[in-house]
Amino acid sequence: MTEVASPLIDERALSKLRWRCRRGLLENDLLIERFFTRHAESGISITQAEGLTMLMDLADNDLLDLLLRRKEPSGEIDTAAVRQVLADLRT
């Protein structure tokens, strides 16, 4: 069974998402920037954008804990989209 890829976000949505992802902790910024650099050619899917947006609602320290595997997503942020983006951010 082949997984259907989520459509990509457009340039305007990408620009807004990049702005939304600016963080107060340098460590978070470095990992997030690496994510955007890695996806510059292939684009970012709507699913990835949804997961990233949910992560950006977290406080900087909570986000860093997830990125560094000090904890795993729980509650309303424990979604497939968040887990997909987290896996990508952590590599």
Image (spheres, helix red, strand yellow):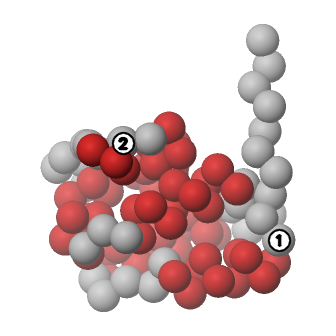
Q: Is residue 32 left or right of residue 11?
A: left
Image location (x, y in percent) of residue 40: 73, 68
Q: Which residue corresponds to mark 2?
A: 78
- The reply to whether residue 87 is in sight is no
Q: Quadrant of residue 3?
A: top right
In this view of the protein, which residue sits in the foreground, 76 or 69? 76
Image location (x, y in percent) of residue 70: 17, 49
The quarter of the rendered structure image containing the N terminus is: top right
Amino acid under disc 1: Asp
In this view of the protein, which residue sits in the foreground, 36 or 53? 53
For the point 69% across and 83% down, the residue is: 15
Disc 2 on helix, strand or loop?
loop
Q: Quadrant of residue 79?
A: top left
Residue 79 position (above or below residue 65): above
The residue sitting at the front extreme is 76
Q: Residue 10: give its label.
A: 1
Image location (x, y in percent) of residue 10: 82, 71
Q: Is residue 1 left or right of residue 48?
A: right
Image location (x, y in percent) of residue 2: 80, 19
- The reply to whether residue 62 is in sight is yes
Disc 1 on helix, strand or loop?
loop
Residue 1 position (above or below residue 72): above
Q: Is residue 3 left or right of residue 91?
A: right
